[in-house]
Amino acid sequence: MRYLITGGAGFIGSNLVDELIERNTEKLTVIDNLKSGKIKFIERHLKTNKIDFINDDIKNINSYPKQSFDTVFHLAANADVRGGVKNTIIDLEENVVGTHTLLEFMRQQDIKNLVFASSSAIYGENKVRPTPESVPDIKPISHYGASKLSAEAFISSFCYTYGMKAWMFRFANVIGKRSTHGVIPDFVNKLKKDPTKLEILGDGNQEKSFFDVGDCINGMIEVFEIDKNITVEPYNLANNSTIKVKDLAKIPDAMHLLPPNIMESISHFKKDVLRGKMVSLDLEETLIALSISATVNPAAQMAVEKLKELAGCEVHMTHIPTPGDEAGLRKLGVNLTSDPDFSTKRLLGI
Ligand SMILES: NC(=O)c1ccc[n+]([C@@H]2O[C@H](COP(=O)([O-])OP(=O)(O)OC[C@H]3O[C@@H](n4cnc5c(N)ncnc54)[C@H](O)[C@@H]3O)[C@@H](O)[C@H]2O)c1
């Protein structure tokens, strides 16, 4: 099969490229303007000449010479819902005009199959939950949702008018490797900046359904390969459970490796018994606390198992480690060297 993938350098698109290469697809061409996509997501396939890459906007695609594709996977879009609130033309241009231009290209080049990345955002706040594809009143509440619904409408009219077929996948929130936007990367970025607080947009009662990008890709490919007897069909692709955003925000707290009671007793011991000024733990103390924690906390247990993999590694420190850190590193079985003159040497360029 010869596939064209629009948006193939993006989060979902690049995972799709990986999977299609894994499945030995005959020819893969990616078109992406790299607006939100990243070349590094597909770099290894470029190096091995497994894909042809066109760095361009799909709105220019009509000027391309005739090529032979069986199917287009259309994922290029403005996927930043909030961006469309500030700039109200972007969803119309990128998602509606972009899709129309692609459909026109397919008509001219006689490409019959389209697999389209639509979105559950088209349903807005529908009262029927989970919302079936056949729900009668579809009322998007975002420009992004409106643009995906408009794109679906054009896809439908092109299919019926020019004998094409389309599989339109209404994804819920997709998460996983290379995810760059949405609530989870947003939380992670905020926690990296300041782990002591987490800002939640909205009242936190928004219910979201998350599912893994691997399931998303496999779902799309399987349905496309099996459900051949269609003209144009929408498919919800999601997890059947949902979670409120405010409950999602509690997960980092629940993941804390050291339970508060252990932290409290260590800090009491250091401050009040040892009269130490610092309440933070050195590495040896951390390992002891983590081992105690691992007896009740599966995340801590996992961390202990991972730390064991460091045994035999070379670690070079640019200062003299504290006795506690040195003892901790010894416990981990790493080969430690240190150079207290590192900063001076760097300063003097030695
Ligand atoms: N991520 C999700 O949770 C989710 C949910 C529902 C639907 N979708 C849809 O799935 C598709 C992929 O989403 P994603 O999360 O991978 O987003 P993404 O932003 O990572 O991927 C979109 C890709 O399209 C490219 N692109 C954008 N406009 C283009 C244009 N005019 N011409 C050429 N390339 C262009 C971008 O550079 C990027 O590589 C989108 O259509 C999105 O609307 C995503």
Image (cartoon, rainbow, N blue to C red):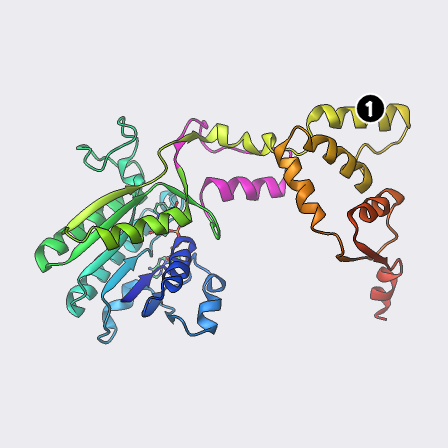
Q: Position of residue 219 (x, y in %)?
A: 32, 48
* Number of numbered labels in the structure image: 1
What residue sits 26% from the left and 61% below the top? 72
Is 291 displayed left or right of 67 in the figure?
Answer: right
Q: Is residue 89 visible?
A: no
Between 25 and 279, the one lying in front of the other is 25
Secondary structure at numbered mark 1 = helix
* Residue under numbered circle 1: 268
In reply to whether residue 135 is colored magenta, the answer given is: no
Position of 153 relative to 53 (above/below)? above
| Most distant residue in the left direction | 161
Q: Position of residue 114 (x, y in %)?
A: 23, 57
Position of 104 relative to 150 (above/below)? below
Q: Position of residue 89 (x, y in %)?
A: 30, 50
Is 336 displayed left or right of 153 in the figure?
Answer: right
User: Dividing the picture into quarters, in which one does residue 325 lie?
Assistant: top right
Q: Position of residue 133 (x, y in %)?
A: 22, 38
Q: Disc 1, ligand 1: is the CB inside 8 Å?
A: no
How many C-alpha atoms fall within 10 Å of the one at disc 1: few (<14), some, or many (≥20)?
some
Between 1 and 318, the one lying in front of the other is 1
Q: Is residue 268 visible?
A: yes
Quadrant of the rendering where the N terminus is positioned: bottom left
Is 259 displayed left or right of 318 in the figure?
Answer: left
Is 61 displayed left or right of 156 in the figure?
Answer: right
**Tag 1: residue type?**
His
Quadrant of the rendering where the C terminus is positioned: bottom right
* Magenta segment: 181-209
What residue sits 38% from the left and 69% below the top? 55
What residue sits 91% from the left and 27% below the top? 275
User: Dividing the picture into quarters, in which one does residue 207 lie?
Assistant: top left
